[in-house]
């Protein structure tokens, strides 16, 4: 039955999807299969992505642009083809609005420095929340220190959700120039109401940046429909390679912004004392780009697009609901964030009473279970919660409810093992 | 599934270490934390001449960071300062009785670093 659905291009055949991700068939130790719940750190890579990267490196590993030989033309075509795929995935007509970076972090730094230097004046405000990853906090702290701008944090509710009333109040003095928000918390999975945030921020004349590093692996992002100014994501969290990310920006802003990195490719003409910047997107892509990684990202986007997005969303909703129910039944399990799954993605941040997340992660590994433990590059959120660290199980389209049951069992046995005797 | 690193002896050092607490009079002390996982350790030592009389520690953290510190305290009571400073990461691993992955080494060595810093206040790179 599942095969029939797959042929029709509807539904999700999870066993077929799993076969695309070789590590899922591996045993981490003899008799111990891998249960991978660390996709929020980096997603596994499907075979077509690995093959696209291998093919480039093996068959046509030439530099892109300005090469007039066969290999370079083939590389350029694949490289620029990936840009077209990313643009289409984001609902963008103009591929020049898609800038390749090394990752989400570099993309946000680019906006903070380039747009920030252009637009921020002393006393201007940047709005963030404690849900943000350090990558969407520290670049703003740096540009605030440089320009005299200030950071303002929106209140979170007790369930660690965005408080829109407090959000509105931050605009009272008319100084907010930028609202930078995650599309999905990497600790709790909470999805701030980005449509509403974007609408309200734009109505007050502020720019909007969405950090889509977590959300894009689970849901689409139509930057044009949202009317946002910038969006950033990383290839490796959407089943692509590490070392590549994307910055989307509105054309008029990208046109007005100064490049951050100078070098080859980002210039049209260089004289002894000055240079003329290249057109978009090259203006922001100095030096040889991560060609293999960009081509791999293109293959990852193809992979995502080949699946029935609604079926993927249904499957992942099933996973998070199952996780809340099963893990929640483990003695001492404390969920971080809302227990209602409606406003969150497939990420479970938690603590287990009497167990340090690091010991937990270490011992789960003995069961072949990969989770993450620590502050997840979200120290302000952990400070707010009054805990130094947490554990996180994050799911992707290749996970199953059965795997989550194994996690629940393992948590129970670890609790017993670590019991004070 | 048992893990020899978390054997009973180690858990005893974690839950009910005789070295957990404070000294009435400490000659050396140091606070360190590992922001990576939020482990915190406070160590204090009482020294008589060149000999370590008492070691106490306090802190919050994972089993490995706390138990390793307790094991070190046990090892160092009665030892000379020179001997204490001569201990290296390999000795801590030997006390734990199990090799550690590079990530877990940070946990395992927190107390060791704190003791080194306490005994040599200028040695911040220890």
Image: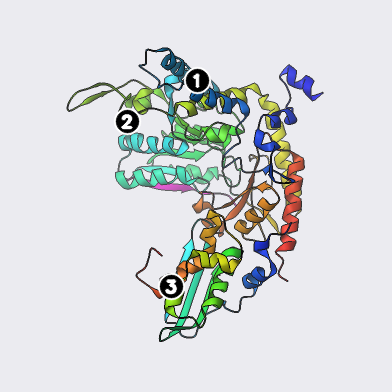
Front residue of A370 and A317: A370
Image side of residue B80 versus residue A351, left or right: left
**Picture residue at 49% right of the left edge, 42% below the top:** A168
- Callout 2 secondary element: loop
Front residue of A354 and B79: B79
Name the quarter where the N terminus of chain A is drawn: top right
Q: CB of mark 2 within 8 Å of CB of mark 1?
A: no
Tell which subunit mark 1 falls on. A
Spatial CA span between label 2 and label 1: 33 Å
Q: Which residue is mark 2?
A: A259
Whether discs 3 and 2 lie on one chain: the answer is no
Q: Which residue is mark 3?
A: B85
Whole-percent x and y of residue A57?
49, 25
Question: Was residue A155 drawn as part of the magenta stretch in this picture?
Answer: yes
- Callout 1 secondary element: helix
Badge 2 or badge 1: first in the primary sequence: 1
Above or below: residue A103 compared with residue A332: above
Of labels 2 and 1, the one closer to you:
1
Whole-percent x and y of residue A38?
61, 43
Q: Which residue is mark 1?
A: A59
Front residue of A303 and B6: B6
The answer to whether residue B106 of the structure is visible from this angle is: yes
Whole-percent x and y of residue A244?
47, 32
Q: Residues within 10 Å of mark 1 (few under 14, many from 20)?
A: few
Above or below: residue A286 compared with residue A335: above
The answer to whether residue A173 of the structure is visible from this angle is: no
């Amino acid at each position: 039955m599942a095969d029939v659905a797959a042929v029709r291009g509807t539904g999700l055949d999870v066993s077929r999807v799993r076969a695309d991700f070789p590590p899922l068939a591996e045993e981490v130790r003899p008799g111990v299969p891998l249960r991978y719940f660390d996709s929020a750190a980096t997603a596994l890579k499907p075979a077509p992505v690995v093959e696209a990267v291998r093919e480039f490196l093996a068959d046509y590993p030439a530099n892109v642009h300005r090469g007039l030989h066969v290999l370079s033309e083939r590389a350029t075509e694949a490289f620029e083809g990936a840009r077209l795929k990313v643009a289409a995935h984001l609902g963008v007509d103009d591929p020049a609005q898609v800038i390749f970076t090394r990752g989400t972090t570099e993309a946000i730094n680019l906006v903070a420095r380039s747009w920030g230097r252009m637009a921020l004046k002393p006393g201007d405000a940047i709005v963030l929340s404690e849900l943000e990853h350090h990558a969407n906090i520290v670049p703003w702290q740096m540009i605030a220190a440089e320009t005299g701008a200030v950071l303002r944090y929106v209140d979170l509710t007790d369930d660690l959700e965005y408080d829109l009333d407090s959000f509105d109040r931050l605009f009272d003095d008319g100084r907010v120039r930028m609202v930078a928000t995650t599309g999905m918390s990497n600790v709790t999975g909470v999805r701030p109401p980005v449509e509403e945030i974007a609408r309200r921020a734009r109505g007050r004349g502020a720019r909007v940046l969405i950090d889509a590093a977590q959300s894009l692996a689970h849901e689409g992002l139509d930057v044009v429909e949202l009317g946002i100014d910038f969006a950033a994501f990383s290839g490796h969290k959407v089943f692509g390679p590490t070392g590549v990310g994307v910055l989307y920006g509105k054309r008029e802003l990208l046109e007005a912004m100064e490049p951050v990195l100078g070098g080859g490719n980002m210039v049209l003409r260089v004289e002894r004392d000055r240079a003329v910047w290249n057109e978009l997107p090259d203006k922001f892509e100095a030096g040889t780009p991560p060609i293999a990684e960009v081509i791999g990202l293109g293959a990852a986007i193809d992979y995502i697009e080949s699946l029935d997005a609604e079926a993927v969303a249904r499957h992942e909703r099933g996973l998070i609901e199952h996780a809340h129910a099963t893990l929640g039944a483990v003695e001492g399990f404390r969920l971080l964030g809302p227990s209602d799954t409606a406003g969150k993605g497939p990420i479970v941040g938690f603590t287990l009473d009497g167990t340090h997340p690091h010991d937990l992660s270490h011992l789960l590994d003995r069961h072949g279970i990969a989770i993450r433990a620590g502050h997840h590059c979200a120290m302000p959120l952990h400070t707010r919660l009054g805990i130094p660290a947490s554990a996180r199980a994050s799911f992707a389209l290749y996970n199953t409810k059965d795997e989550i049951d194994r996690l629940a069992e393992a948590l129970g046995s670890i609790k017993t093992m670590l019991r004070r005797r | 599934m048992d893990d020899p690193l978390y054997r009973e002896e180690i858990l005893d050092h974690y839950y009910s270490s005789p070295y957990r607490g404070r000294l009435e009079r400490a000659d050396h002390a140091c606070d360190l934390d590992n922001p990576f996982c939020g482990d915190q350790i406070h160590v204090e030592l009482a020294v008589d001449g060149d000999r370590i009389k008492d070691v106490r520690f306090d802190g919050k953290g994972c089993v490995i960071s706390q138990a390793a510190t307790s094991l070190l305290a046990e090892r160092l009571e009665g030892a000379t300062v020179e001997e204490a400073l001569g201990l290296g990461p390999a000795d801590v691993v030997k006390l734990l009785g199990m090799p550690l992955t590079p990530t877990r080494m940070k946990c395992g060595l927190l107390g060791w670093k704190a003791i080194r810093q306490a005994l040599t206040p200028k040695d911040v790179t220890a």
